[in-house]
Image (cartoon, grey):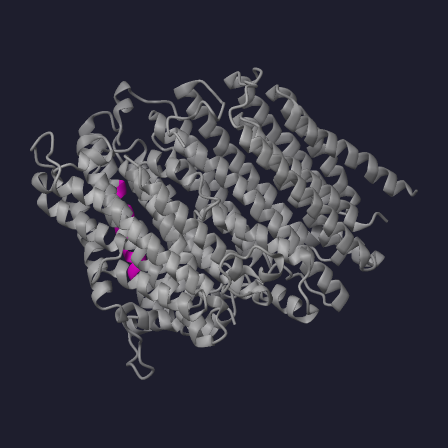
Amino acid sequence: MTFELMMFLITAVVALTGGIGMVMFKNTVHSALFLLLNFFAISVLFLLLQSPFLFAIQLTVYAGAIMVLFLFVVMLLGAERIEDTTDKLAGQRWLALVLALILLIQSVAINLITGSNEPPMQELETLALLSDPATLGAELFTTYLLPFQITGIILLVGIVGVVVLNQRVRTAQDKGQIN
Amino acid sequence: MVPISYYIMLSAALFTLGVLGVLIRRNAIVVFMSVELMLNAANLALVAFALQRGGIDGQVLVFFVITVAAAEVAVGLALLVAIFRNKRTADVDEVNQLHG
Amino acid sequence: MQFALTDVPRILPEILLLVLALLVLGSDVFERWANTDAARTEQHRASASLAALGLGMILIIALIQSGYVYRLPDDAPINFLTNIVRNLQNGGPASELATTPILGAFATDDLTMIGRLVVIAAAFLTVLLTYDARPTANPGEFYTLIIGSTLGMCLMAGSSELIMTFLAIELTSIPLYVLAGYFRNDRQSTEAGMKYFLFGAMSSGILLYGMSLTYGYAATAAVTQGSTGNNLTQFERIRELVAQAGEPTVLLTLGMLFLIAGIGYKVTVVPFHGWSPDVYQGAPTPITAFIATASKVASFILLFRLLTTTFPVLTGAADVIIPVEASTFTGWTSLLALLAFLTLIVGNLAALPQTNAKRLLAYSSIAHAGFLLMGLVAWSASLAMDREAGIASLLYYLVAYTVMNLGVFGVLYVVDQHTRSDEISVLNGLARRNLGLAVLFTIFVFSLAGIPPLSGFFAKFYVFMAAWQAGAEWLVIVGLITTIISLYYYLRLLRAVFIVPPDTDAPIPTPRWMATSLVLSALLVIVLGLFPNIILTIIDNVQAVAGR
């Protein structure tokens, strides 16, 4: 067993633990922390996959910004209380399990198919080029210029939306707005 | 080298967990976190495929997904705060003025 | 591939939409601080008129650019005006530039142009509807979000690449989540926003997973074929790789299934329709109209382009009644035929017992998605002519669907502004309270039900014909039966308007610009129904380009 495979197996177990823990734990704060664990594991996997830049932004954006936002809202709303466990949608739970089973079978199927005729690994210099953040940056500003601009608009629209939704109500009269 | 198919397997398992979470959890915040797990699973598969091919387009897609996810999370949590101000709950089953 | 200066006129409508969004957002600065009702109304109208004017102008510019109404002859005299028109039309769908997408990501062909025109027109009519409404909080932001979402829809209609598709869908959806929950003091509205958001976020997760599998297939194929280049996310490129690889694998099929499921949420196809009745009912009525029409148009065009460009090997056949065995399940047309069947049945039957008018129309809109799918199913035909009839019928249906739904939700909005309710019972005796409005409502409802000579009838007829030619006779029969079922609930609406006596005879006023928007929609419903050729000649342009 190589060092890389060992790293992968450990990280994969951590990622799966994070995922399972997030789904199973009833307390929202625990769920959020398990998700954080999962994000960390995935960022390590990005590193194993020769993408140091994605490793960095996965850590700063996902694990840093997004999870902090989640935890902040959970604390703000006091939504961490134990969830109501009485099952209101028993049928949905069955459906979920069936669906999960189908998806798992599918994952094994993909593995069998792609695993049987897996193409050879890339050469070293290709890998070096691939893992260089400069390559990614160059692509962003040439081939993917249009999508890059659009992300800017998405962020702007997102900011406008968030401000509108949570702006302080100015006057009491504002309550009787429209519709 | 770790075979790419291992990563794809892991990604499929994580995606399954995400779907499971969306379907069985009732708390809107947790449902939302499960969606993030689904996105992460897809990202993992994309980066793995990009490495296999030696191309960078998969990584570019992941970059965009992470950016957009940040905007989406902000809007989603803002909606959640707005709804909470009205109703003081984050349970999707209690959010049922519009009966299904 | 680099972005060239000649690409600028090709995305001019999108650029102008962005400029307009920023203008509307910034225009609030010059408004007085709105503390009184009068000042608030003034502020609202300033933003609304700026947005409406801008959208109207962009619509006209796009129309000139398209060359559908007037095409500048080559020997036209050279002056200032003709130069502008020529430059515009050089970026239009008729120029040779339009054959290759910008950076491989954004196609500017006829399909995009038609999508753009419909979406911008829908946004324009929606904004007109809201002009006379009670003022919204932060009107500048409200209209900015509408325009931002319109921009996203235009990009959706033209996107020919996976990254672009994902971003365009998000740019469309994020403003719509906020708009659905815009009235944050209204519990129904915030709930609608939350539900729309949760389902939308989940659907983009599914879509992205589908993209990763499709990309994975393309990556594997590219390595085995020894091809290089960073363009594996382009629809065209994936199709080439698939064609060279020969047999499609499970990976590609799965990717396609996830992609269909992800977009299926946006177009409210059963079984992915669960969110739409709640969101349609809870969202502010003009936003409901906008979500129900424009976002569906963009999603259907995207679905069409994605499936026909990327997955021609997986087209399949739609001639089996219900494909139970895997062997009869040959491709996406079989799958869409099955989904259309479910959508028609569930949509029409679930509409029957509804008591809320918006909810009823939500189910009716689900049912219409079933009819629209039949246009896509027609792509399974073996003759190119029949396939082209399929896309023509789909586009015609989209146009007709947009105008009649904008109209019918618009009438509900007028009534809702007066009565503050959207139960069917508030429509009682509308004929006595406002005859003009009742007549408009009747036109829209008849068109939705498919009564000749309105455009809804011709749309259904054309879709049925295309599906029949493609060998989906069973689906056409289901469509006919469900059309007859749908008459029941549409006539229930009209019964309330004309027969049931009202609680009060107080007239319902129709403000000027709301009336303008409704009359425009009604005129389009009638004219497109009587003279479908007006638009069919335009739609015919698409056939040379689409998905070959």
Q: In this image, C146 relative to B58: left or right?
A: left
Which quadrant of the figure has residue C179? Answer: top left
| Image location (x, y in percent) of residue C432 | 7, 40
Q: Is residue C242 magenta?
A: no
Q: Where are the magenta residues, as a range?
A: C47-60
Quadrant (top left/top right/bottom left/bottom right) for the N terminus of chain C: bottom right
Above or below: residue C101 compared with residue B71: below
Q: Main secondary structure of the magenta part?
A: helix
Residue at screen point 48% across, 71% down: C381
Say if A121 sits above or below B62 in the image.
below
Is residue C155 visible in the rendered image? The answer is no
Camera-nearest residue between C501 and A79:
C501
Residue at 34% over, 38% down: C142
What x and y, as percent, mark residue B49? 72, 53
**Residue C475 versus residue A103 in the image, above or below:** below
Tell whether position C56 is magenta: yes
Q: Is residue C9 or residue A110 the one in the foreground?
A: A110
Q: Find residue A132 and report its horizontal and vertical position in percent.
A: 74, 51
Residue under the point 79% across and 43% down: A48
Relative to residue C237, is residue C185 drawn left or right?
A: left
Say which residue appears at 9% left-offset and 30% top-offset. Answer: C504
Viewer-proximal residue, C121 or C217?
C217
